[in-house]
Amino acid sequence: MVVVVLGLLLGGCGERATSVERKPAYESLGELPEELDADGTTIRVGDPHAPVTLRLYEDPRCPYCEEYEQTGGGPAARDRTLRRTVVTEYTLASFLDDRVGGSGSKKAVNALRAALEEGKFAEYHAVLYENQPEEIVDGFTDAYLLELASEVEGLRVPAFDSAVKTMKYRDFVTRSEKAYEQAGSDPRGPGTPTAVINGNRVSEEYSGILYDEVAFDRLLGAVEKDPEAWEEYEPMSEDMD
């Protein structure tokens, strides 16, 4: 098997993408297909036939997830998802509520599931990370989640508002956290953000690539050109899926 060399992973680190004026992420995501996988916890965004599958483990309150989504690999992944060469799968955790206190993660995951029901998950996900409160503040209240939903055209329908206020998808929140905890050998979960590309995890040793847009884009591009060339530096457990 051809192996992705370490230089590919690290060569772009420290670089930044050329400064360009981007539209807010959510303004370009409405065209993407999105669905709940048959496993009942994975939310899939993008062309299911894309050559690269990127699975992300995130907690909405996690500041490192915000860094990934805003200034790290997230913009590169979104661009490639829009070009239908990457399909992105999300497993949404909510462990920070127990570790830090509060209920913001659970409320945000519930609201994201409600947005999926309206076909607005990708847009709303982008809005939440663009407006993420400080982790310690526990700022994802019902009122704030509804306020942010107003930025996504067509999302503030009665069914969505009711789902947010009543925690309609509480069972999904619990099952999604359980799926996160089972993704790897550590019973607490793999950490957030964690990225798994075509079934192979970006190991903690090389996790810096998640926060560098240029380097992460290079990696996704290399896997797209030759899916067999992605070396499994740190395999996830067999019960990941």
Image: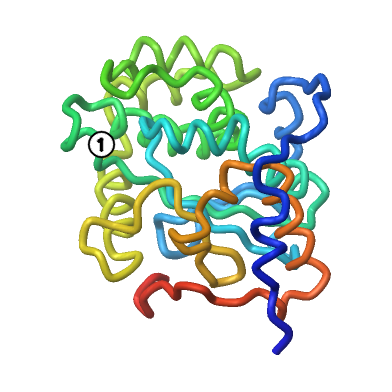
* Secondary structure state at the residue bearing disc 1: helix
Q: Is residue 209 above or below residue 99?
A: below
Whether residue 229 sits left or right of residue 166 in the image: it is: right
Is 69 positioned to the left or the right of 188 in the image? right
Q: What is the quadrant of the C terminus in the image? A: bottom left
Find residue 142 and report its horizontal and vertical position in percent: 33, 16
User: Which residue corresponds to the image point at 45% horizontal and 21% vertical from the top-left?
Assistant: 132
| Location of the N terminus (image quadrant) | bottom right
Decide which of 44, 104 is in the foreground and name it: 104
Position above or below: 107 against 197: above
Q: Against 17, is 85 above or below?
A: below
The percent coordinates of residue 238 (x first, y second) are 38, 80
User: In which image quadrant can residue 223 be found?
Assistant: bottom right
- Numbered label tally: 1
Q: Which residue is mark 1?
A: 96
Measured as percent of width and height from the top left, residue 207 is found at 50, 54
What residue appears at the point 29 percent right and 65 percent down from the top-left corner? 182
**From what the image shows, is residue 8 above or below residue 232?**
above
In front here: 167 or 173?
A: 173
User: Which residue is painted at 62% across and 31% down in the image?
Assistant: 71
